[in-house]
Amino acid sequence: MKTQTSATNRDADSTPRVQLVDVPEDRAGQRLDNFLSGRLKGVPKSLIYRICRTGEVRVNGGRVKPDYRLNAGDKVRVPPVRVAERGPAEAPSDNQVGRVEASIIHEDREFLVIDKPAGVASHGGSGVSFGAIELMRAARPRDTLELAHRLDRDTSGVLVLTRKRSALTALQAAIREGRVEKRYMALIEGNLPKARLMVDAPLRKSVLQGGERMVRVDPEGKESRSHFSEVERYAGASLVEVALETGRTHQIRVHAQHLGHPLAGDEKYGDRAFNKAMREHGLKRLFLHAARFEFEIGERSYSFSAPLPPELAAVIDTLQQRRTSTPR
């Protein structure tokens, strides 16, 4: 990797300096924030996002967002970053590591797949010390693990990690090109007007004054498509399967709200009265579960699935006891 610095005598002076880093071929397609995390060891993600937002990080001389996908040969300006002197980094507890390690549903030479529990973030940052990736790295310190995609903290289900750089770039290319099938199970308010329907509504992210991230349907947003299919209907609610063509932040939650059928347990985009009714059926979390993740790389096909976790299956059991009609 070619690295240039803004001053000489680096070995004689440990003061951090600006670096201009050429992106090697094996990092093509990697997100800028992840690239920076690899170079700025120990620097929290919140600081990485800040130096991107303020323009201290630049790619080919211009400002880019943290989710920018790098190209081979891009020149990344990495600013000097100081991290306050601290004692040894806090390690996750054995219980935290054990919980995520127990969720492994598949592993081979290229992939490690977990059934991520709800409440566990995909990665650390924004007040979260350890996400699934950090916990799995603690469990498998000899592996070179990377997140291939993300799930919201409150969403459970299939989360794919890679063990080789070649696997990561191949899967990320498949995701960008729409060659990955992702299906979720969700409980929504009411019943869909049709057994199957597609929502084609562009989504736009915004940050409120207090720092809360919100997503809304907006003609100026990014194209977003979700396919809803009714699985079973109950009194005042329906279990649906949602297939995604795109993978925008909070896509299923906002598209369900846009339909007028918000997700059960959704404190951000949901309906308060519906959420209260579902709590009476035992629901204590967002009812959204990543049930299946399928893709092909070369001549090999992969299909990973995870059943509804017990706490969601129990809610369905109580609703079935009061079901008023059968599935279509």
Image (cartoon, rainbow, N blue to C red):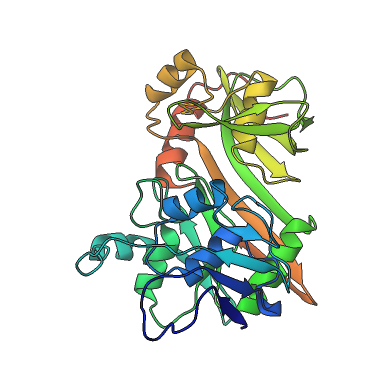
Give the residue at x 63% y 50%.
Answer: 65
Where does the image place residue 5, in percent across and percent down from the top left? 54, 76
Q: Is residue 278 visible?
A: yes
260 horizontally vs 309: left or right = right
Q: Nearer the viewer, residue 204 or 50?
A: 50
Q: Nearer the viewer, residue 232 or 290?
A: 290
Give the residue at x 71% y 63%.
Answer: 60
Res. 262 image quadrant: top right
255 horizontally vs 139: left or right = right
Please determine whether, in this image, residue 261 is positioned above or below residue 299. above
153 horizontally vs 19: left or right = left
Please determine whether, in this image, residue 41 is positioned above or below residue 131. below
Please determine whether, in this image, residue 19 is positioned above or below residue 81. below
Give the residue at x 62% y 82%.
Answer: 2
Res. 86 image quadrant: bottom left
Where does the image place residue 105, in percent across and percent down from the top left? 50, 66
Q: Nearer the viewer, residue 35 or 158?
A: 35
Where does the image place residue 138, in percent across and percent down from the top left? 35, 71
Picture quarter with the C terminus: top right
Give the residue at x 73% y 45%.
Answer: 246
Q: Is residue 302 visible?
A: no
Q: Nearer the viewer, residue 87 or 198?
A: 87
